[in-house]
Amino acid sequence: MPEMTQPSPPQNGPKRRTKGFERASGLVQSQIRRASETRGFAESRLLTHWAEIVGETVSNMAIPVKISYAQGGFGATLTVLTTGANAPMLQADLPRIKDKVNACYGYAAIARIRITQTAPTGFAEGQVAFKPAPKAKPTAPDPKLAAAARDVAAKVTDDSLRQALEALGQNVLSRGKR
C-alpha cells in the first residue's frame, strides 16, 4: 500500500506559532535586534539595561548612542551622550564604565569611550532625557465625590468590602470629570 504524505505548508507565508502563548519580547525581538544593530549595538542588552550595567549615577548622567568598529582594528568605540556639566565627572569614570560594559559583552569588546556633549535641553525637537521623569503625584479626590461614594456604600456592614466599594465608587464617579 502506498504511504500517504501530507502536503507541506507554503514556505513564503507568515510563520505560524506552534505553541500557546508567547512573551511579547519574543514577538518583537527580531525588530529590536535589527534596530539596535543599525547603531552598532550587537548586544541590545547594553541599551535596555544601561542603568543596571553602569549604575544609577552614571545612567543619570549619560546614555549610550552608538558603537563604531574600526576597520581591521581591535575593539570598538562606544559613544555616550551627556551634558557639558557632567562630562568631566564622566571622564573620570571612563575606566570603570569600560570595564562594566565589557563585562556585559563578556570580553573586551569596547576599547575606547567617546563622550559627546549636548545642551541640557537636548537636541532639536525634544529633550534628551538622562533619567526617567518623576512620577506624578496622585491628586486628592473631590470631597463631593467621596461623600457620594460613601453614601452609596454605607449600607454594607463588612468594613473591608465597604472601603473597596467606596474606592470603586470614587473611581467610577470621577471618570466623567476628567
Image: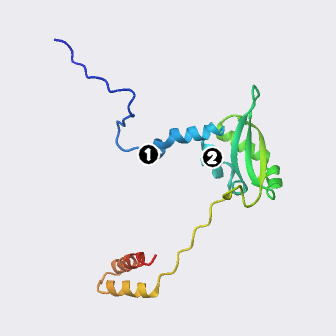
Residue 39 image point, x, y percent: 65, 40
The amino acid marked with disc number 1 is: Arg
Quarter of the figure with residue 40: top right
Task: Assess disc 2: are there few (<14), some (14-19) or many (≥20) residues with their C-alpha within 10 Å of its C-alpha.
Answer: some
Task: Indicate the secondary structure of the residue bearing disc 2.
Answer: helix
- 100 on left or right of 49: right
Q: Nearer the viewer, residue 91 or 16?
A: 16
State the residue at coordinates (37%, 83%). Answer: 149
Q: Are marks 2 and 1 in contact (CB under 8 Å)?
A: no
State the residue at coordinates (44%, 78%). Answer: 177
Q: Which residue is at the far front?
A: 125
N-terminal of the two: label 2 or label 1? 1
- Quarter that holds the N terminus: top left
Relative to 48, does residue 4 appear above or below in the rendering? above
Q: Which residue is at the far top?
A: 1
Q: Which residue is mark 1?
A: 23
| Residue 162 visible in rendering | yes
Q: Which residue is mark 2?
A: 47
Task: Indicate the secondary structure of the residue bearing disc 1.
Answer: loop
